[in-house]
Image (cartoon, grey):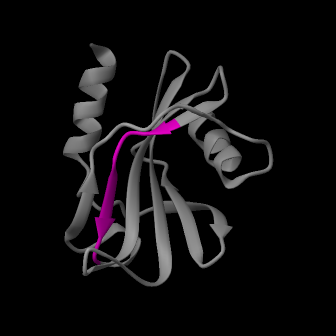
Amino acid sequence: MKKLLLLVLLCASALAQAKDWERYAQSGDTALYYDKFRRVIMSGMAFVWDLHDLDRQAEQDGKAFRSVLYPTEVNCRTVQKRVLSSHKMSGPMGSGETVAEDTMVGAWTDVQPGTPDDRLMAAACRP
């Protein structure tokens, strides 16, 4: 029940643009950020917003987007993560209108050392 309430709160704030994204990695032409102010840690689990800011515009189904927001759940004990949904945004840094949404909760994946996911996990699980 606590997880469900937390997920609802995270999704309710999906379109609220944070002013202070903290960069945690660069992957090709995509800068990766997390929102340190909307990070929640509870019983070894962390919930964090992951923002992928694209250098250039991309398209899905004929609709252009410049960034993708991923509410993400991290298991700090088992070193795994899963994406709870994705929101493709028309503007950079999570701004603009939602172009596409995928609300399917992803599968748990192991986080490999030295990867951008590892850096996100370290930031999300930091006390």
Residue at position x 67%, y 40% in the image: 122
Q: Nearer the viewer, residue 1 or 107?
A: 107
Position of 100 with respect to 21 (left or right) is: left
Residue at 25% from the left image edge and 42% from the top image edge:
11
Quadrant for the C terminus in the image:
top right
Quarter placement of the N terminus: top left
List the single residue furthest toward the front: 61
Identify which residue, 123 or 104, lies in the foreground: 104
Task: Identify the magenta region.
Answer: 82-90
User: Please, what is the dominant secondary structure of the magenta stretch?
Assistant: strand
Image-quadrant location for residue 60 = bottom left
Residue 51 spot, x, y in % from top left: 45, 60
Asked where in the image residue 71 lies, by quadrant, the reply is top left
Residue at x 68% of width, y 38% of height: 111
In the picture, residue 19 is in which quadrant?
A: bottom left
Q: Position of residue 94 (x, y in %)?
A: 34, 67
